[in-house]
Structure formats: structure tokens, C-alpha cells
């Protein structure tokens, strides 16, 4: 058994979500944004429509990070975008060829070690923020850029588009979700749309995760959420958590906290 889904961004334009739901689509993955705090122009409309119609959804963030610190900041922006909504599917990290090309333009060669550390920075921050992390990747990236431990640490959203996909049969490399076509047709959407199959009951998994978090936060959990918050608000870059703070650094953080950026 699997659930039928789509993933969308601004490239799909205005979507008639009533028709999408009536067509049998059971979930959606919505692009929340990209890079250092750039929102997807269609995200709010898509998220509001899915919420109104009861279409379960998750979100993803297209990464232009070329350091772990940048990836953690992207996670903070993604968490901020999600804060108004209830996610029933994962919060995914999307790192692709454009991501590597952008790093190259900045003089950075993306090695397997670097890419893997970037994934862990984003997904670790997502997990610390109370969300369910996932990594979007095609087979090439799984072998060339991400080390073998990544699929053991995080669910994989596999991007692989065979000529005659059989979504009822989960591919070995899919770790929970498979994007099996980039040329799908769905009522309510003009043009092509990506089609997905989810093999895990993510709504149940996420409900269980949220239920397991009831009660007072541990110091570590509280510290992780505080770190995400100061990064999201631009108060601190969230680095060197165990270092002492000088008086000047404290002044700057208080100044930013007051909104005088």
C-alpha cells in the first residue's frame, strides 16, 4: 500500500486544490523557499488551501548552502515558514545540481564529506526543532555526494523517473518516499507536475513524535529550539554554543533583539 502525492512550487502557478483533492491525491509536498530566507511565492496560498481542504502536507527547502552553518540557517527559515501550519509529512532538504553549481561559483568544491555535513546540519536542526527531517536525492547524489550513513540517519525521498514506473513497488533506494515522475498530469494543475508515492504512514509517525514530546522540555531540547530561534530572528548566528560571550557580543544581541538591525 502507498499514498499518492504531488510536490509543487511556484512553477505550477495557481492550483485548484479542490480538483486536486477530488482527483485522488492524498498528500502534497510544498516548496517553502530556497537559499537564505527566500520564500516560495506560492507557499502561503498552497499551504492555506491544503489546510482548509484537509490535504495532508509536508514542506521542502531548496538549498544553496555551501557550509553547515548556512544549511542550519536554511533550516531555521524553513521552520519559521512551517510555524503557522500543522505538518503531517516531513520537512525535506533539497540539495541538487544547482546547489553544487552555486557553491562552485563561490569558489567552493562540494565533496562527499561537505555535502554530508550540510545534510546533517539542516536535518539535525529540523529534528531539534521538533519536525521530521527527510533528504531529497536522486541515485547519483546518494552515491556521489552523500555518505552511506545518511540513509540510515534520515528518510530518503528518492527522485528516480523510469519510463514505466510501478509506484506500488517501492525501489530499494527509496527510504519512505519515491518521486517517480516529473511529467505527471493532475486535475487542477496546468502543465506537468511531479508525482510521488509515500510508503510510510507519515501522519501517524508524526503524531507519535509529537505525542512523545509532551511534558517539560529537556535542557538539550530547549537549547536546540532556542538556537533555531536566535538564528531565525537574526539575533545570533547560532555558532560556538559553548564559547563565552563578550560584553560587546551581548550588546549586539540585545540591540538586535530590540529590532535595531
Image: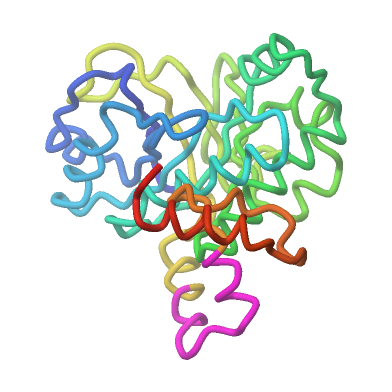
What is the x, y in percent for residue 16?
14, 29
Query: Which secondary structure type mostly characterizes the magenta part of the structure?
Result: helix
Residue 211 in magenta stretch: yes
Quarter of the image for residue 211 reads bottom left
Q: Nearer the viewer, residue 227 or 124?
A: 227
Nearer to the camera, 75 or 15: 75
Q: Residue furthest bottom?
A: 215
Q: As drawn, is 193 to the left or to the right of 206?
A: left
Q: Residue at x 34, y 45 (%)?
A: 27
| Residue 95 percent across, percent down from the top left | 63, 29
Residue at image coords 49%, 53%: 235
Please, is residue 143 above or below residue 75 in the view?
Answer: above
- Image spot of residue 15 (x, y percent): 19, 26
Q: Is residue 26 magenta?
A: no
Image quadrant assignment for residue 98: top right
Q: How is the image coloured?
A: rainbow
Q: How many marks?
A: 0
Q: The magenta stretch spans which residues?
A: 210-226
Dividing the picture into quadrants, the one containing residue 20 is: top left
Q: Considering depth in this image, is 44 or 90 the residue closer to the camera?
A: 44
Which residue is rendered at x = 68% and y = 12% of the image? Answer: 101
Q: Nearer the viewer, residue 62 or 249?
A: 249
Residue at position x 50%, y 49% from top?
A: 76
Left or right of residue 202, residue 149 in this image: right
- Left/right placement of residue 115 relative to residue 259 reads right
Image position, residue 149 (x, y; %): 84, 49
From what the image shows, is residue 11 above or below residue 141? Answer: above
Quadrant of the drawing holding the C terminus: top left
Rendered view: 241 above or below 66? below
Amino acid at each position: 500500500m502507498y499514498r499518492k502525492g504531488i510536490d509543487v512550487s511556484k512553477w505550477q502557478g495557481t492550483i485548484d486544490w479542490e480538483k486536486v483533492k477530488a482527483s485522488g491525491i492524498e498528500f502534497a509536498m510544498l516548496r517553502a523557499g530556497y537559499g537564505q530566507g527566500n520564500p516560495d511565492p506560492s507557499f502561503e496560498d498552497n499551504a492555506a488551501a491544503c489546510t482548509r481542504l484537509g490535504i495532508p502536507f509536508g514542506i521542502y527547502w531548496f538549498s544553496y548552502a555551501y557550509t553547515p552553518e548556512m544549511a542550519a540557517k536554511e533550516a531555521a527559515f524553513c521552520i519559521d515558514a512551517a510555524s503557522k501550519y500543522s505538518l503531517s509529512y516531513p520537512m525535506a532538504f533539497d540539495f541538487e545540481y544547482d546547489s553544487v553549481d552555486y557553491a562552485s561559483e563561490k569558489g567552493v568544491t562540494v565533496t562527499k564529506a561537505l555535502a554530508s555535513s550540510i545534510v546533517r546540519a539542516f536535518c539535525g536542526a529540523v529534528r531539534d526543532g521538533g519536525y521530521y527531517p527527510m533528504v531529497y536525492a536522486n541515485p547519483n547524489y546518494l552515491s556521489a555526494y552523500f555518505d552511506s550513513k545518511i540513509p540510515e540517519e534520515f528518510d530518503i525521498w528518492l527522485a528516480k523517473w523510469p519510463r514505466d514506473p510501478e509506484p506500488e513497488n517501492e525501489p530499494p533506494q527509496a527510504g519512505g518516499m519515491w518521486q517517480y515522475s516529473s511529467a505527471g498530469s493532475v486535475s487542477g494543475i496546468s502543465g506537468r507536475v511531479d508525482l510521488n508515492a509515500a510508503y510510510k504512514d507519515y501522519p501517524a509517525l508524526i503524531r507519535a513524535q509529537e505525542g512523545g514530546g509532551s511534558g517539560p522540555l529537556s535542557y538539550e531540547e530547549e537549547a536546540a529550539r532556542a538556537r533555531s530561534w536566535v538564528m531565525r530572528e537574526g539575533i545570533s548566528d547560532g555558532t560556538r554554543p559553548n564559547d563565552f560571550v563578550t560584553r560587546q557580543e551581548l550588546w549586539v544581541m540585545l540591540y538586535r533583539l530590540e529590532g535595531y538591525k
